[in-house]
């Protein structure tokens, strides 16, 4: 069925998936959602940079053909009040890769959040957040270059499953009575109740994706982060299932931290990654004090939520932290910050978060040369102290520029 409002570009080919493997043609069609608020500014600037890098790296042999799809306020204008049209999901299912700016959550619109809806409907079960430092970026750490981790956060269960019962409601009272009567559970009268489901299925597919990523990218370890000392049958089970999937499916190429010491005297053998685990509270301290001990991290939803924002602060904050939500057949790359409405159309904000989400996308497509061109040109631009307002106020002697001028400076530095 043809789309109602989406217009596929005249040129370019669809990305395909066969037996779980992506096939990326040289001229792929990629879907983008502009985003609300500052979305227009950062998407326009970032697209210029991505296109310039691809052109520079492959001399016209490769090119992205952009296809606009709609969500948020722009969708509501085009689709008569519908903030999340069905054909947006359909386009992402058919074209497999999308990139999006931030979206306003409509108040009282029947959606918990457009972003959450997108993840749930397309089963984008892993939220992937790389956290690395770019030379020159203001950081509160003395040695920010030691931070280089990729956090895999489970997207579909834990507190995000939203199984909650409000204090004072009949549902709450029924469940409270049941828990007291059947299990002898003890808690204060009138307590709000929430249920935290953690399954073997969701835990294993998340850890599987994290281990595959570590293997493909030559990473050294995968750390399972959990609070299993207290929540034994949810967080503790995540840990257990994580080790199980490593042993059962990647036994040849993984070792546990215990084996590392018992069999290899602490010296990591070539070709094997180490699977270890840490309690969720201490990981915050370790990431701050000994960041180079961590590489890929896999965790459940709430831990991952806290940890990825905290880690982002070590290397420049959410203004430049990229992210993606990745399922088995669809990946959506996205800015991790919100719509910053007070800066809408002021050509002011930092496009870094969306820009680096695009770099993640290029890496996901194996277009490494284009990704690396952007990384290097970005560092050069920051070294020249050409920055947007948010960095300018943290740097001495900076030249403050707008979003679009910043993009032009990055493109000029690709030469
Ligand atoms: P926000 O991230 O939009 O803004 C908070 C502050 O961070 C801004 O005022 C600004 O000072 C700064 N900031 C954000 N992005 C920046 C950038 N690129 N460059 C420089 N500074 C930047 O968070 P908020 O104000 O809590 O949320 C506003 C709206 O965004 C809400 O409707 C919320 O639902 C939505 N939101 C969307 C997403 C998403 O789409 N992924 C994420 C978070 C919030």
Image (cartoon, grey):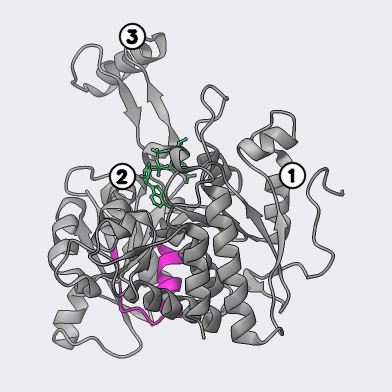
The first of marks 1 and 2 along the sequence is: 1
Asked which secondary structure carries label 1, the reply is helix
Using residue 136 as the reference point, say whether residue 348 is left or right of it.
Answer: right
Question: Can you say whether 172 is above or below 337 in the image?
Answer: above
Q: CB at mark 2 closer than 8 A to ligand 1?
A: no
Asked which secondary structure carries label 2, the reply is loop
Q: Which residues are magenta?
A: 206-223
Question: Is 218 colored magenta in this rendering?
Answer: yes
Q: Which residue is mark 2?
A: 234
Q: Position of residue 63 (x, y in %)?
A: 69, 76
Q: Nearer the viewer, mark 1 or mark 2?
A: 1
**Toward the viewer: 18 or 47?**
47
Q: CB at mark 1 closer than 8 A to ligand 1?
A: no
Q: Which residue is mark 3?
A: 168
Q: CA distance from mark 1 to mark 2?
A: 36 Å
Majority secondary structure of magenta residues: helix
């Amino acid at each position: 069925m043809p789309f109602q409002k989406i217009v596929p570009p005249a040129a370019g080919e669809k990305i395909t998936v066969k037996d779980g493997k992506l096939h990326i043609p040289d001229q792929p069609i990629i879907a983008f959602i502009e985003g609300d608020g500052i979305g227009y500014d950062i998407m326009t600037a970032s697209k210029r940079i991505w296109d310039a890098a691809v052109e520079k790296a492959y001399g016209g042999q490769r090119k992205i053909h952009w296809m606009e799809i709609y969500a948020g306020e722009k969708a509501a204008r085009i689709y008569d009040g519908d903030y999340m049209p069905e054909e947006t999901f359909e386009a992402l299912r058919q074209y497999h890769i999308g990139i999006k700016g931030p979206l306003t959550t409509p108040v009282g619109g029947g959606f918990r959040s457009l972003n959450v809806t997108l993840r749930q409907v397309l089963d984008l079960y892993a939220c992937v957040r790389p956290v690395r430092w770019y030379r020159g970026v203001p950081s509160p750490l003395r040695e920010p270059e030691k931070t280089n981790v990729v956090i895999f956060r489970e997207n579909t269960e834990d507190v995000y499953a939203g199984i909650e019962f409000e204090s004072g409601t009949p549902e709450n009272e029924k469940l409270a009575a049941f828990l007291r009567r059947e299990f002898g559970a003890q808690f204060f009268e009138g307590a709000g109740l929430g249920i935290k489901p953690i399954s073997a299925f969701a835990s294993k597919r998340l850890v599987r994706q994290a281990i595959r990523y570590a293997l493909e990218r030559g990473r050294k370890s995968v750390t399972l982060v959990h609070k299993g000392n207290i929540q034994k049958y949810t967080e503790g089970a995540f840990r257990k299932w994580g080790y199980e999937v490593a042993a059962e499916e990647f036994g040849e190429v993984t070792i546990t931290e215990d084996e590392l010491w018992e069999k290899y005297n602490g010296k990591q053998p070539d070709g094997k990654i180490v699977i270890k685990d840490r309690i969720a509270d201490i990981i915050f301290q370790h990431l701050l004090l000994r960041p180079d001990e961590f590489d890929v991290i896999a965790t459940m939803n709430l831990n991952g939520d806290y940890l990825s924002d905290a880690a982002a602060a070590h290397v420049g904050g959410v203004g430049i932290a990229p992210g993606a939500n990745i399922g088995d057949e669809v990946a959506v790359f996205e800015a991790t910050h919100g719509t910053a409405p007070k800066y809408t159309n002021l050509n002011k904000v930092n496009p870094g978060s969306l820009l680096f989400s695009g770099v993640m996308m290029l890496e996901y497509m194996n277009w490494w040369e284009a990704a690396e061109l952007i990384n290097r040109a970005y560092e050069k631009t920051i070294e020249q102290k050409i920055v947007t307002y948010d960095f300018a106020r943290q740097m001495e002697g900076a030249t403050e520029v707008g979003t679009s001028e910043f993009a032009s400076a990055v493109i000029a530095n690709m030469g």
